[in-house]
Image (tube, rainbow, N blue to C red):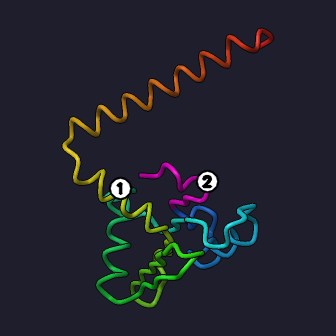
Amino acid sequence: MKKGIAPDFVVDPKKENKSVEDKVEDIIHTSSQKDEHFELICFNENTNIGVTRSVFYAIRNALAYGSFSVNNNNGKPVYYFQSERNGEIRSQIRLKESTLLQWIKFFNMPVNDVRALNQSQKGKKNKTIKKRKKENIYE
């Protein structure tokens, strides 16, 4: 899920004693991304349900309470989600439509297909690492 979104994937800004809003502002102002609508996920992790479910929970809440918007980025939609609880912003997420559609594909895939995809990507990564080691004899 996180592929394509890192390096701006943040799990828990409270570890830095920051609010979600402050951490998002830090990310925006320190990012070297040329695209002003770059993807990011910043939320206070619900340790009872883990990272992936926390992201789904945040998106679900944003949709349920109408705390979302869609912006146009050169003809490509970017979705902004925000989730609050008791007046505290718990998450801010922005994702490109292409990412959301890719996630839907993954979620609709049979488990064996997802495992096979993960294995093939691990294989590609290992081949790249081995190739680099062969090329640089000084490492």
The residue located at (56%, 67%) in the rendering is: 14
Count of picture labels: 2
> Looking at the picture, does residue 83 appear above or below residue 132?
below
Instruction: From the image, tell me which residue sits under label 1.
Output: 50
Callout 1 secondary element: helix
The quarter of the picture where residue 67 lies is bottom left
Task: Report the magenta stretch's main SS.
Answer: loop
Q: Earlier in the sequence, mark 2 or mark 1?
A: 2
The residue located at (36%, 28%) in the rendering is: 119
- Left or right: residue 112 compared with residue 96: left
The 10 Å Cα crowd at callout 2, few under 14, some 14 to 19, many 20 or more, is few
Q: Is residue 90 magenta?
A: no
Callout 2 secondary element: loop
Per the rendered image, the range of residues in magenta is 1-11
Instruction: From the image, tell me which residue sits under label 2.
Output: 7
Amino acid type of the residue tagged 1 in the rendering: Gly
Along the line of sight, which residue is nearer the eye, 86 or 115?
115
Amino acid type of the residue tagged 2 in the rendering: Pro
